[in-house]
Each structure stands twice: as structure tokens, then as C-alpha cells.
Image (spheres, grey):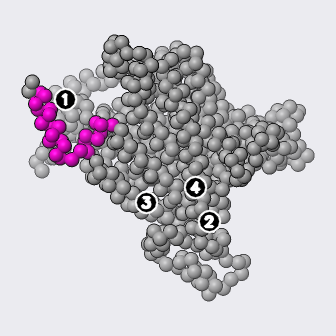
Amino acid sequence: MLKYILKRILIVPVLLLFVAFFVFILLNLSEADPVLQMMPAEYTQVEYDAMAARFGLDKPLLVQFGNWVVNAVQGDFGISYKTKGPVSGDVLYRIPISWNLALITTLLMIVIGVPLGALCAVKQYSTFDNITNVLAKFMGSIPGFWLGLMLIQVFSIKLGWFPTFGMKGWRSWVLPVFTFLLPYLANYLRQVRSAMLDCIRQDYVRTARSKGAKESVVIYRDALRNALLPIITLTGGIFASMIGGAVMIEKVFAFPGIGYKILEGINNRDMPTILACTMILSLFTIGAQLVIDISYALVDPRIRATFAGKKKVKKLDAVKATGGGE
Amino acid sequence: MAKTTDTKTTGTKTTGTKTTDTKTTGTKITNTKTVVRKKTKKRSQAAETWARLKTQPLAMFSLGVVVLLVLVAIFADVICPYSLAIKQVAADKLQPPGTPGHILGTDNFGRDILARIIHGARTALEIGVISAFLSVIISTFLASLCAMIGGIVDNIIMRIIDVISCIPSLVLALAICAALGNGIPQLIVALFFSGLPMHTKMIRSVALGVAKMDYIESSVALGASPGYIMLRHLFPNLTSIIIINGTAQISMNIMMGATLGFVGLGVKAPTPEWGTMLSGGLSYMMRNQYMVLVPGIVLALAALFINTFGDCLRDALDPKLKGKA
């Protein structure tokens, strides 16, 4: 088990390196010359060379990438083309903001989504289930950024309950979290429902019922517990996709997170900023995936068994052999 | 070495040559058999799917809306000329809906919103359909390679896919758009790439299951080449997941295209596009909120009905999946 976790963790830097390379090459496909873009209208060749040297842009692409990696490992993401200041100082402090936005939304999603989804599955095809389903389908199709704009229109401008944009205390979190939550919750609900439905139809649930167990115990202990596995995968996957989806919410509410910064970087054609933000968001995604894989192994004894040490497997085999002999 | 040459010769025999040999007559018989079976099966599967779809009013209604959307996109020029969608009339700025001549009003440049919505449908479908089609086709091809050849090819393809899938899809699309610039082809490339990893993973897992089937094994034993098996046995068994993934991706890409348009990375300036219309209306929200309301509602409805139809189609294609999210 420990070996499995170690293996998964050790692969992260390798993945990050390849992601960085991919994005680095991608951003360099751009035809615009970053040096030219930073120069004033009139310049001499000497000035041009000096500017290129200052940003390390006079070196071959691979050397540039190598330098970037060496610096990035030390927490230095280069110099912004726009502000001419270090990118790290402008980007790193935004991490908790984006992180909290995704985390709060995910927690709310679990707290609301799992019970509601389970209830829908238990009362399949009831009026409650049908209404929730139709609503969820509808909510899942609304573009998040548009929903955000409409909410601002109603709750901030007309009613004045919440600030329209920026970070001003807990009130500024309400609308972004709600806007972010709704489409994801809609999909989550339906997926929890289907995971739960799968479990309710299983033989062990029927067995539990025929034993005479109370219905609430059957649902709670036999069905929901087994449905947890797919639900964990779902939740992790949604959390990972939220990290990317936060970009739009941050844009609409002018929320000073990573996503807001990446759009700013794109508008300014500021490659170091785009690269840094992309890498941080990718790191989040990889981390979320890692946590899913590990928790999956922790929760499911069947998966745990496949990663058990050789001694344990032998023991298990021995038990099986004696069991079969009887 | 001898083994490989053997498979090669029998492979060519199965695909075409007609010599009076006991071996070929054997394959001939099986060939005609499969053709006959395939024909009846094919007809019945499509017909069955259609029959199942017909019983659901929701499916038929959403299909109607989708067909309407497609017709509007195709006949956009017939319904109203393109010039109307980009013509700027300073005198007609920011008219509310119901103004004579402009049913849905006008935007800040005096352009007719309805005309822009109609031509925006064409842009949206063009972007959504082409990019979804590309990513599904390419990922099916990659997934089949993984499943049929396996080993190192599978490993290399999947590791590359792993790396790409580490980048959140919207962020990847943003980065590609940032690098390539504005325009419809660039947008299609961006959406194609962002959809690729997910589809390759999903289709590969199905293809791996199909590749283990007995009929594939017997086909290999008969000496069929991997390409032949792919075309004849693997692809037909992947059709339902391809269709399901494709429809889901179309609505996702329309939404994502609008999202990119909203942040200013979409199409070039005068081209009507729903997301760009939305962001253009933001500064005028106080004076004419319909500039924001109308494209948003159209976008939400388009996504809703394509999604609903996709869900119904999936249920009809594979009743086992019914009720799943």
C-alpha cells in the first residue's frame, strides 16, 4: 500500500515536467514576438538585444525551457512581460483564493448532493425524483458565466444584498459560490442517483431486506456505503474540473484568483504569467487525481488487496486454499 | 517469422481473392454469412433505436428543437441576409425588443439582435459540430490503436493523453487560443484538443473490452489483419459510445466556444457569435439588458435540448444504461 502511494507521488513531478514542456512549446507557437511587443515604438538593434537578453529570450527554446524549470522549482516563475516584475509575487498569493472557492463549492455540493441524490434513487420515478431530474437537467445546461451575470443583476444591482465584484468580506463569496455550485450540483445529483440506483439493485441489498432489516438500515448501511466508491471518484473528478471552471466565475465576479490572472495574462499576451497559472492549475488537477486514487485504494478492500505485500497475499492464498478444502 | 508471413497471406485471402481452394471457400461462406447477419442486424438496430426514441415525447420534442436549430443554421442566409447581422446603423442604437424592423431589438452598434442570433447559430454549430466530430474521430482511432496493438503503442499514446489531461480542459483551450490567436479555425483546434483526452480514455476502455471478445480472437485466428478487424469488428461495436460521446461533446463545445468568446478569445470582430454578443452587452446592461438576456437564453436552450436529446438517444441506443446520469 505504502509502495503504491509512494509510486503515485513520485510520478507527479514527472507529469508536471511534461505538462510544462507541452504548454511551453504551445505558447511559443504564437507568432507574436514577445520582445517586439515590449519595445517602444522606436528602438535600435542594441536595445532589442538587451531586452531579449534580459528576459532570456535570446537563447534557444530548449535552453529557455531548462532555465525556466530550474527557476520554477525554486518558486521563481520568471519576469512578467507586462509588469516587468516577478510573476511569482503576483500569482502565488492568489492560490488560496481559487483553492477556497473550489473547496467550499465542493463541500456544499457533497452536503447537498449526496442526500438528495440518494433520496431520488430510493424514490425512483416518484414526483420528487422527476421534478429534481428535470430541474437538474435544466440547471446543468445553463452557462455558468451567464447565470452569474443574471444573479449580479438581480441580487447586487437591484436588491443590493451582495457586492457586484471583488473581495469584500464573506458577502462577496456568496454569489460566486452559488453560481459555481448550481451547474455542478445538477450533474453531481444525477450521477449520485445513478450510482445509488446501481447499488440498490444488487443482490446483497435484497438479501439484507429479506433478512428483515429495517429499510433505513438497508439503504444507509448496505446501499449508500457501497455507492460511496463511485461517488468518491465522481467528487474528485468534479473537483478537478472545477479548478478549470473557476476561471469563468472569477472573471464574471472579478474575483482575484488564479483564473482571473490567467485571463489577464492572455489579454496582455504575457506568456510567463500564462505558463505559471497553467502550471498551478495543472498541479491542482494532478493533486486531486492523486487524492482520488489513494482514497479509492483506502476505501475499497478489494483494491487494497491487490496492492498488499507479497506476505499478505500468500497468507490470503493460504486462507483461500484451506477454505476451498473444506 | 514464419508465423507472421502466414497471417499475412491468409489475411489477403480473406479480404478479396477468389480462388477455388478449400480454405477460401471456407472463408467465403463465413463472409456471406456475416454480410447477411450484419445487414439484418444493422437495419434492426437503427430501427429499434428509432422505435424506442419515438415512444418518448421528450426525445421527439428535443429532436424537433435540435432539427430547428440545425435548419436555422443551414438556411441562415435565406432567413435573413448576413449583411443585416453586421450592418451598423447608428440611428438605431440600443433599441428594445418589439421595435418595428427589429423584433429582438438592436445592440450598441445598431445591429439587429435577431439576425445576429440566427447567424450566431451557424457559427456555434460550425464550431461545436466540427470540433466534436474531429475529437471523437481522432480519439476513436487512437483508442482502437491502443486496444488492437496494445503494448508499447498503447503505453505511449496513453502517457501522452495522461499529460494532456492534467491540464484542465478550459485552461488548455484558453492557452491554445492565446497561442494561435482569434478565429474560427483556431477555436476548433482548441476545442478539439480539450476534448481529446477524455474521449480517448472512455473509448479506449470500451474498445479494450471489445478487443477481448471471442469474435475478435477468432478473426485473428482466421488470419485477418488488424486494420480489417478494426474496420469490420471493432468500429461497429463502438458506434453507440461514439454517438453518445459525440452528442455530449457538441453541446459542451458550443458552451465552451461561447465561454471563450465571452472572454474575448473567440471569433474575429464582426462575426456574430453568442458568447461575444454576451460580453459585448455587458457594458450596456443598464440601458438594454436584452443584449445580455437574449444570447444567454438562446445558448442555455440550445445546450439544454442538445443534452436532453443526447440523453434520450443514449437510453435508446443502450437500454441497459437507462436512468443513468
Residue at 44% x, 52% y: name it. Answer: A286
Q: Which residue lies under the disc numbered 2?
A: A90
Q: Which residue is mark 1?
A: B27
As rendered, which of A309 and B130 lies closer to the eye?
Answer: A309
Q: Position of residue A190 (x, y in %)?
A: 52, 29
Q: Residue at x 61, y 51 (%)?
A: A247
Marks 1/4: CA distance? 66 Å
Which mark is in front, 2 or 1? 2
Distance from disc 2 to disc 4, alpha carbons, whole Å, reads 13 Å
What segment carries the magenta color? A300-324
Mark 3 and mark 4 on one chain: yes
Residue B235 or residue A114, whichever sits in front? A114
Confirm or deny contact between disc 3 and disc 1 (CB under 8 A).
Answer: no
Q: Position of residue A171 (x, y in %)?
A: 71, 45
Query: Same chain for the residues at labels 1 and 4, yes or no?
Result: no
Mark 2 or 3: in front is 2
The secondary structure type at the circle numbered 1 is helix
Circle 4 marks a residue in which chain?
A
Q: Which residue is mark 3?
A: A16
Picture coordinates of residue B31 (x, y %)?
24, 27
State whether residue B191 appears in this view.
Answer: no
Is label 2 in a helix, a strand or a loop?
A: helix
